[in-house]
Image (tube, grey):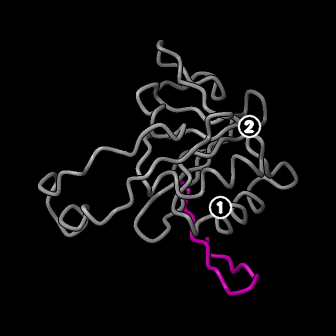
Amino acid sequence: MKIKVTNEKDVYVNWFNVAPGVWGMKDTFVNLYMIHSPADNKWVLVDAGLKWSVPKIKKMAEHLFWPDVRPSAILLTHGHFDHVGSLEKLSKEWEVPVYAHKLEKPYLTGQSAYPPPDPTVGGGAMATISFLYPRGPVNVEDKFHPLPEDGSIPVLPGWKY
């Protein structure tokens, strides 16, 4: 579905259905997801896109989950810039926990920059220019929670990582 957001400038939001209760959005070159949990009628955001993804994420949430547009949590697959770009702003505005693997903690709590990329991994243009990507940490220390060791996801009953 494609919708137009009318703010200071026009923003187009493209999302797609992945499976029942799971929607994805491609923003530039990154994907993020919204998952509805029927067990408690709540939803979670998986990854927070790029720094400019905030209005697109909020508009998608509004269309899918109105009036409960605030997720129960934000889940991160990892802390690269294209997955955490809108994280600080959204987690602060929504006042929700942020879950990620315990090894991501230094990069999500302001303690460390991400390790330098290896531009030879994977090949292609994105890998070649990876040395240009921002690596600085984000700081959501007050919201960060490590995912449980048993592979469960606290806000998605029955899901595993």
* Mark 2: secondary structure: loop
Which amino acid lies under the numbered mark 1 shown in the image of this protein?
Answer: Ile
- In the image, 1 versus 147, the foreground residue is 147
Vertical side of 128 occupied by 92: above or below: above
Q: Residues within 10 Å of mark 2 (few under 14, many from 20)?
A: many
Tell me if residue 40 comes above or below residue 43 in the rendering. above
Dot 1: element: helix
Give the percent coordinates (x, y) of residue 16. 54, 61
Residue 14 in the image, given as x and y percentages of width and height:
57, 70
Q: Nearer the viewer, residue 161 or 88?
A: 88
Residue at the disc numbered 1: 57
Main SS class of the magenta portion in the image: strand
Q: Position of residue 103 (x, y in %)?
A: 40, 27
Residue that extends furthest to the bottom in the rendered view of this protein: 9
Q: Residue at x 29, y 66 (%)?
A: 132
Category of crowding for the residue at label 1, using alpha-carbon neighbours closer than 10 angstroms: few (below 14), some (14–19), many (at least 20): many
- Residue under the image location 57 percent in, 64 percent down: 15
First along the sequence among labels 1 and 2? 1
The part of the chain drawn in magenta is 1-17
Q: Which residue is mark 2?
A: 72
Q: Residue at x 15, y 51 (%)?
A: 121
